[in-house]
Amino acid sequence: MKKISKSMKISIILGVFFGLFLLFVKLWFQLSVEEMIRLDVFSSIAFVLINVIINISYNLFYGRKINTLTPLLGEAKYDEYLDKITAIRDKVKSKHLRAISELNRTAALTGKKEYATAVEMLKELEPRVKKMPSVEMVRRLNLCLNYFYLKDYEEAETLYKDSEAIFGKYKENAFYKKNFTLLDLFMDLCCYGKKEGVAERIQEARKLYPEKQLQEDFEYLEGLLEEGKENLQEDTKSDI
């Protein structure tokens, strides 16, 4: 048997009190059956609208609080971000907001180079966010990047190809474009072996996205590119 959520319990309690209130109004004003039906209909509509407005306001309020923390990631203040986003996650009652908070925690863990932990959390999040397209896209994007940092290129490529449809809808989105620029550089360099022109693309991306977090990512890519060149030179010497 499914457990009744706290929000559902609150709604049931409010509904009971609302019903008692209507009964009191009927008895006090001695309303006819027709008047009572009209009162029931209009009151029910008002009750639903008030609940919807409260829920939307609640989600908007905490959604903004989560968004105001984003600059901390760009400044690589990962511990501070983790403390604040975890506090929000533990406070909110909305499953949607808790899932988003948990997803955002993985971004800080990636910044702290705790890739394996981030991967496990991202996998566990799948059933909670798969029906939220934009959130599921971010989960897959973050998971791909963590696979690359773990040098699990096979998993990264499989997930990327499986996600092309959902990624395609957001690649030109101004907010996510920098992340897809990074992801595509990883794909070309680590999975497709396209080394030509990658150094120039990294430099161009460096100029476009000065955030400290991304600069560290581009530095890591440059290290991989240099490592590939050294391996190629060693292979050439061996052949000689």
Image (cartoon, rainbow, N blue to C red):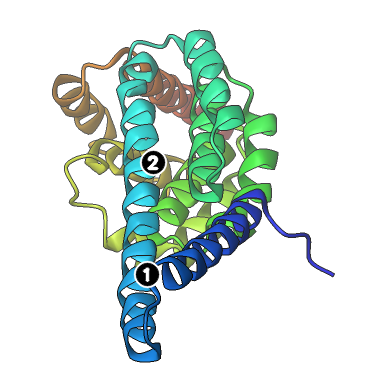
Name the residue: 57% across, 29% down.
Answer: 91
Where is mark 1, residue-wise? Answer: 29
Q: Quadrant of residue 117?
A: top right
Q: Position of residue 10 (x, y in %)?
A: 60, 52
The answer to whether one can see residue 159 in this image is yes
**Mark 1 → mark 2, Cα distance in angstroms:** 36 Å
The reply, left or right, for residue 125 in relation to residue 231 is right
Name the residue: 46% across, 26% down.
Answer: 224
Name the residue: 57% across, 41% down.
Answer: 93
Q: Earlier in the sequence, mark 1 or mark 2?
A: 1
Secondary structure of residue under mark 1: helix
Q: Amino acid at mark 1?
A: Phe
Where is mark 2, residue-wise? Answer: 58
Q: Quadrant of residue 73?
A: top left
- The quadrant in which the N terminus is found is bottom right
Q: Position of residue 97 (x, y in %)?
A: 48, 42
| Callout 1 crowding tier (Cα within 10 Å): few <14, some 14–19, many ≥20 | few
Q: Choose between 62 and 228: the one closer to the eye.
A: 62
Relative vertical location of residue 53 with respect to residue 150 in this rendering, above or below: below
Number of dots carrying numbers: 2
Relative vertical location of residue 49 with respect to residue 235 in this rendering, above or below: below
Relative vertical location of residue 106 with respect to residue 95 in this rendering, above or below: above
Name the residue: 25% across, 52% down.
Answer: 171
The answer to whether one can see residue 194 in this image is no
Relative vertical location of residue 194 with respect to residue 84 in this rendering, above or below: below
Q: Choose between 10 and 231: the one closer to the eye.
A: 10
The reply, left or right, for residue 29 in relation to residue 172 is right
Q: Amino acid at mark 2?
A: Tyr
